[in-house]
């Protein structure tokens, strides 16, 4: 039982008028206060904006005068709080709007909820900056997108049609997500400022991608590219040729089944096409097999390419790619690469894939911007083709050796020490040595070596990259995390 004494203790403390006037935060100019609030808002989101607006009268006046704190309208849950959303819309003033629609409002009362949502957002279509659908039924999506054909949307920069993989959706969530009779090009052509697009459309005619010429980032979702490797290469070349400003391209290759199915690899090594050059692409992230990804990379000339995935543990390519990239790009901008001597992602070197190990030392000499190097299942032939990272890759910070052999820990120790002493060389910050199961003793660090490594950097002895799936490489551009 809560007594009056307990109630007084639980009640929020209200400082006197004199104390409130003396609070330093209340003496800050409005613009300084807004900077502080914006920093916390980026970290904690809308929940912090609501909290800040209930601290005191001054804070409430300030936060309510900041339209960008209230411009995100999320229609989620079986019964969206329409009163709260309308209040946020009023507080957003003339700020550009970010609109998110989830699937929950459309499971039981789809049309009534859609009508209510459209009454709220359609009158403000000229202020839309981004529109995101998450597992929304195609019928609902089509109705709302068709309205865009007859409306002026001069500010819409981001359109995301997100559909989870079928294997991650419950049976009641297996909603129709597309229709082959609906032409998305009619919508996309009517969005002159569209720069960021995520699209999931398994029934799409691949010619729809010709509508994306003004994009900066494009993500093609699961099931949309269930095609053989050669047609995949042709689609990518077509996209890059028609999208000169594209900087980020993310694609999910293969079928969208109940269980994850590997894409077709038939004749992947026999693909021979003329190289396609693109001068702005920085991120090429293809969710597919190592062989298919490597074959695609070897058909492209990307002078500004920085990485093949957002994380170092994905985007693995075979050894041949590192030689190809070094030969075609004399000033490589690559910042992270993960190479393997087993394109089947096995845990021991495969002779056919490891055959090109001889190119590794010379290729790395051209990677002056490399921050992360991950080597997996590579046999360096008793150190003959082991790269001397004490004299190349001056920007390198992370180095991983997983399931490799043919090197000595002593040579690695010498390289780490050399980078510490050489001016203009970044010292290594993270090092992982996890040898192959059949590696000789000289590939395994002794306790004394482990102690030495641990004093000068973050040393790891097991492959824990699965724990770091969201870790992006050092100094990377965070914009990719938002796509």
Image: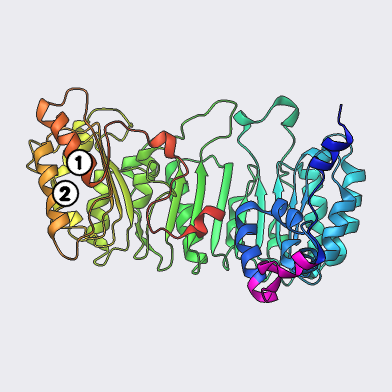
Q: Quadrant of residue 8?
A: top right
**Label located before the other in sequence (1 or 2):** 2
Within-10-Å neighbours for mark 1: few <14, some 14–19, many 20+: many
Q: Is residue 265 visible?
A: no
The residues colored magenta run 18-32
- Name the one closer to the observer, 149 or 123: 123
Task: State the mark number for residue 416.
Answer: 2
**276 relative position to 188: left or right:** left
Q: Residue 386, how many percent across, how many down? A: 13, 44
> Can you identify the residue that label 1 sits on?
453
- Residue 340 screen position, x and y as percent: 27, 39
For residue 222, say whether it is visible: yes
Indicate the position of residue 178 as horizontal and vertical percent values: 71, 43
Q: Is residue 211 above or below residue 140?
A: below
Q: Secondary structure at mark 2?
A: helix
At 35% from the left and 39% from the top, the residue drawn is 291
Q: Is residue 260 above or below residue 9?
A: above
């Amino acid at each position: 039982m809560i007594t009056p004494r307990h109630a007084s203790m639980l009640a929020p403390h209200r400082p006197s008028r004199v104390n409130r006037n003396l609070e330093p935060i209340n003496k800050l100019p409005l613009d300084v206060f807004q900077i502080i609030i914006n920093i916390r808002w980026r970290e904690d989101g809308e929940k912090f904006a609501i909290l800040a607006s209930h601290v005191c009268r001054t804070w409430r006046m300030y936060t309510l005068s900041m339209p960008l704190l209230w411009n995100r309208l999320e229609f989620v849950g079986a019964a969206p709080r329409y009163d709260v959303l309308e209040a946020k819309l009023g507080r957003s003033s003339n700020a550009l709007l970010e609109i998110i629609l989830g699937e929950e409002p459309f499971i039981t009362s789809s049309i009534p909820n859609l009508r209510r949502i459209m009454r709220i957002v359609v009158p403000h279509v000229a202020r839309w900056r981004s529109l995101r659908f998450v597992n929304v039924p195609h019928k609902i999506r089509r109705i709302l997108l068709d309205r865009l054909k007859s409306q002026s949307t001069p500010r819409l920069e981001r359109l995301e049609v997100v559909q989870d993989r079928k294997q991650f959706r419950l049976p009641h969530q297996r909603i129709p997500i597309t229709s082959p009779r609906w032409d998305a090009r009619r919508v996309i052509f009517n969005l002159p400022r569209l720069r960021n697009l995520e699209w999931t459309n398994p029934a799409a005619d691949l010619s729809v991608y010709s509508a994306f010429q003004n994009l900066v980032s494009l993500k093609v979702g699961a099931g949309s590219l269930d095609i053989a490797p050669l047609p995949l290469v042709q689609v990518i070349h077509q996209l890059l040729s028609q999208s000169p400003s594209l900087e980020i391209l993310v694609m999910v290759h293969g079928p969208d089944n109940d269980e994850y199915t590997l894409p077709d690899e038939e004749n992947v090594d026999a693909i021979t096409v003329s190289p396609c050059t693109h001068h702005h692409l920085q991120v090429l992230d293809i969710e597919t097999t190592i062989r298919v990804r490597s074959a695609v990379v070897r058909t492209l000339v990307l002078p500004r390419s920085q990485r093949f995935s957002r994380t170092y543990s994905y985007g693995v390519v075979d050894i041949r790619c590192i030689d190809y990239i070094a030969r075609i790009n004399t000033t490589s901008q690559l910042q992270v690469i993960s190479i393997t001597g087993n394109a089947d992602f096995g845990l021991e070197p495969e002779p056919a894939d490891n055959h090109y190990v001889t190119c590794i030392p010379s290729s790395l000499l051209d990677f002056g911007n490399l921050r992360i190097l991950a080597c997996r299942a590579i046999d360096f032939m008793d150190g003959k083709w082991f790269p001397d990272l004490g004299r190349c890759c001056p920007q390198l910070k992370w180095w991983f050796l997983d399931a490799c052999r043919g090197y000595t820990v002593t040579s690695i120790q010498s390289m780490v020490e050399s980078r510490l002493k050489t001016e203009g060389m970044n010292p290594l910050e993270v090092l992982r040595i996890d040898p192959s199961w059949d590696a000789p003793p000289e590939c395994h660090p002794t306790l004394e070596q482990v102690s030495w490594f641990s004093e000068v950097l973050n040393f790891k002895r097991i492959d824990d990259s699965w724990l770091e799936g969201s870790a992006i490489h050092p100094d990377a551009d965070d914009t990719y995390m938002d796509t």
